[in-house]
Amino acid sequence: MRGRPRNAIWAALAIVAGLLLTQSTWWDTNQTVFAQAVVSGLLIGGVYSLVAMGLSLVFGVLDIINFAHGALMTIAIYVSYLLFLNQGVDPYLSLFITIPLMFILGVGIQRFAINPVMDAPIHNQLLLTLGIAIIIENLALVFFTGTPRSIELSYARNEFDLGPITLDFPVKVFGAVVTLPKLIAFIMALLLAALLYLLIKRTQLGAAIRAAAQEPEGAELVGIDVRRIYTITFGIGAACVGAAGALVIPFLFVSPTAGATFNIIAFIVVVLGGMGSIPGALVGGLVIGLTQEMTQLFVSGSSKLLGVFVVFLAVLLFRPEGLFGRVQR
Amino acid sequence: MSRLRRIAQASSRDLMILAAVVTVLGLIPLGVSRFTLSVATTALIFALAGIGWNVLSGFAGQFSFGHAAYFGLGAYTVAVTLTEFSISPWVGLIVGGVIAAAFGLLTGWISFRFGLKGAYFALATFALAEMLRLTFNNLDYVGAGIGITIPLAGGDDWGRIQFEDTPSLQYWVLLGIVAVSLVAVIAITKSRLGSTMLAVREDEDAASSLGINPLRAKMAAISISGFITALAGGYYTQFLLFIDPDLAFGPFVSVAILLRPIIGGVGTIWGPVLGAAILSVLGEVTRSLVREPPSFLQVIEGVNGLDQVLFGLILVLVIIRAPDGVLGWFRRRRQRSAV
């Protein structure tokens, strides 16, 4: 609670800075670019949040650095892609296949590969998930080659009549372009975040997961099968990328390393938001999305990720428990 | 001086093993093709990088997931000092080591001061290496994304560590550097510094209650570790005669570096060398299997990525079956048979 007044000061400073910015001459010429950066950052940030939520659960509950998270997303991406290509299944319908499928796969991986090394030092768990990632990514390479593919949604550029308003995609918001697939991905990410939050906070399973995260031995004493909770948690984590994989294929190139790029960002989001915190992952994802677009806007010629890593290191050093985490050092 | 003599005495057994290992490794170039020799040289370079990693992450217990930072700093220092200032790579190797050690001291001081440990320290090291990669990718002075090509000296040139006519020499010089590094590591493990590192690894709080300064032990470990890994990176530049940000700082460089000691045995003197030997044999076997499969496996011929799938499978199996590396596995077997 000590942080509250300080947060208010930061918020006030941010508002003042924002007001000053809108008065400057820079604003007059770059308004649209800025709006585009904010919108793009928030939209992609929603997807980062969704990927990070799964990772945050795994990191927070099982305390392992899961490098297979992005590779699992790659599987979901290819499943959704193949369903669209061969059966003509709409990517948003394939969510109903990818989510349960990835849950089962996650449960299997945890049950047969990771549970046996739960007591090993962190580098072993890290290497194990890395090995799994190498297997998955290269299997994708074997079956689908490295050629990037993409799909085109027939209705992505349609007009939508929503009663009082008509939306003609791509919509313009303050001059910034918003495409339909990115908007759907963003909204779905928020929706799934809410569902996951309710699952963790309001259900008996959620209570057991929280107990296993905070005090595994105590949880065991009151009759919780911690190994089973670990297995389910990893399954839920995988289900999150199952959803993310299907949501991104309308606007992302499908390739064996498509998921891996999300993995690193997800780690940063998790540390930023606080391990195991669903709201933290949500806010963290949006912040990181904005950070990368702002880096590109203001630091010319540099990679988007540079700013992201700077934020990451600052959080690691000054607030390692994350924005929403409990202090435990 | 008496302290030095005591260290030398305690090390005598390991030094004898070292002499045997170096002799065996030194014989390799005599009976192999040029291609196999280059595989062996690469193996030795990553063994050296792993020896460095092992000091920080094996002995002092601070798991680094970003040793590419030191490797890359060493690699680029050699490339820049040679191409921009015509300084011999011999000097470049040392300068690179010093720069990497300084980088380790600076980043280590910040990280350890703020109490980063375990997974958090690992992620911080990873972020640092990635930041270096992204920075070098945009730095025109070091060739940005294109990288730096080392001009050919032509023939054998000791001053520039290029041995076009006799590649065995390049291998032997490297073996010499590896041997010296191993002597240093052996001496450290037998010294007071080595004991404090182990104490910090096992229980930091207990160590500091006994009057050990954990920060000092970790700082010593990170600088020595960075120096040795940078030597490997510098030699890598001399071996490839080319360096770019991905080869120097890429995430897979960090993985390649830590994989060898972990497969061989974390926190053991011989783990990195053993792991490097195992991994290169394994890598070549899987690669040749995919290139020229036996008749009943004809379908896998030339399939891209299959050797990596096999590699991943073996990695997963090793971690599950032999979590403390090959040396640890042998030790446990011996203990079990002794009981």
Image (tube, coloured by chain):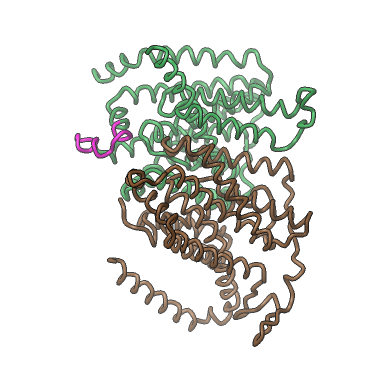
Q: Residue furthest bottom?
A: A164
Q: Is residue A329 above or below residue B292?
A: below
| Residue B281: percent from left, percent from top | 61, 23
Question: Can residue B225 be seen in this snapshot?
Answer: yes
Q: Residue at x 70, y 76 (%)?
A: A169
| Residue A94: percent from left, percent from top | 68, 58
Specify the segment rendered in magenta: B199-212
Magenta span contains residue A122:
no
Q: Is residue B87 above or below residue B265?
A: below
Q: How many marks?
A: 0
Most foreground residue, A146 or A66:
A66
Q: Colour of chain A?
A: brown
Q: Residue at x 46, y 18 (%)?
A: B330
Magenta segment's dominant SS is: helix
Q: Residue at x 55, y 72 (%)?
A: A38
Question: Can residue B177 be seen in this snapshot?
Answer: no
Q: Residue at x 47, y 60 (%)?
A: A199
Please identify the quadrant where the N terminus of chain A is shown.
Answer: bottom left
Magenta span contains residue B209:
yes
Chain given the colour green: B
Q: Is residue A253 above or below residue B207?
A: below
